């Protein structure tokens, strides 16, 4: 067997998983969905001018889904999958801690850290195949990130009006 034949055989074996079209399509859909859902949350953060935006949230969601898919496709059993999830959570916690800034007056970045952590959870859900739950959770996250500040601003505005009305 020539060197070239060995190289071709090795390459063919490395890409043998692509021969199973059902497997390939499922993995592709999950990875693309992770990009989409992470992107939705990241876009909202980007529009708010936050440090962790579109690319960060996409990569966190995609990475979490990939870790789960790697474990799943390698035949990991429940306890091994649990350790993979724990590793993702710990790693994302470290990343989120880097977005928190504390100075003498206040703490900033907690919501960004939480959005990164939540995006990783969505990626885990996507990787496990819980598509509907992941999609619904993404919509809820966007509602919280976008609408809660608007509601809070409205309350502050109404309180300001009441203070102006009272002598």
Image (cartoon, rainbow, N blue to C red):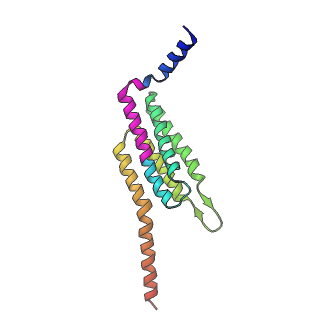
> Which of 88/127 is in front?
127
Residue lying farthest to the right in this orientation: 104
Residue drawn 44% across and 70% down?
152
**Total numbered labels:** 0
Residue lying farthest to the top in this orientation: 1
- Rendered position, 97 above or below 24: below
Specify start and end residues of the magenta stretch as a single range: 18-36
> Which of 12/118 is in front?
12
Is residue 31 covered in magenta? yes
- Rendered position, 159 above or below 123: below
Residue drawn 43% across and 83% down?
161
Residue drawn 43% across and 33% down?
78
- Where residue 137 appears, x then y in whole percent? 39, 51
Query: Can residue 94 be seen by looking at this rendering?
Result: yes
> Which of 97/146 is in front?
146
The answer to which image quadrant residue 19 occupies is: top left
- Where residue 118 appears, x then y in whole percent? 47, 50
Magenta span: predominant SS is helix
The answer to which image quadrant residue 17 occupies is: top left
Query: Can residue 125 be seen by looking at this rendering?
Result: no
The reply, left or right, for residue 61 in relation to residue 129 is: right
The reply, left or right, for residue 37 in relation to residue 87 is: left
- Rendered position, 149 above or below 4: below
Q: Quadrant of the N terminus?
A: top right
Is residue 108 covered in magenta? no
Residue drawn 45% across and 34% down?
69
- Where residue 46 appears, x then y in whole percent? 50, 57
The reply, left or right, for residue 114 in relation to residue 19 is: right
- Where residue 24 appears, x then y in whole percent? 39, 30
């Amino acid at each position: 067997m020539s060197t070239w034949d060995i190289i071709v055989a090795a390459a063919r074996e490395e890409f043998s998983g692509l021969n199973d079209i059902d497997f390939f399509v499922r993995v592709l859909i999950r990875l693309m969905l992770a990009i989409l859902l992470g992107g939705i949350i990241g876009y909202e953060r980007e529009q708010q001018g936050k440090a962790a935006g579109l690319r960060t949230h996409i990569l966190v969601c995609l990475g979490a889904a990939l870790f789960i898919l790697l474990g799943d496709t390698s035949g990991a059993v429940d306890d091994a999958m649990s350790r993979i999830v724990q590793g993702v959570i710990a790693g994302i916690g470290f990343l989120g801690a880097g977005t928190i800034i504390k100075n003498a007056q206040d703490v900033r970045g907690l919501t960004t850290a939480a959005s990164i952590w939540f995006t990783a959870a969505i990626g885990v859900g996507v990787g496990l195949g819980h598509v509907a739950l992941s999609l619904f959770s993404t919509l809820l996250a966007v509602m919280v990130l976008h609408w809660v500040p608007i509601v809070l601003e409205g309350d502050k505005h109404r309180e300001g009006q009441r203070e102006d009305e009272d002598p």
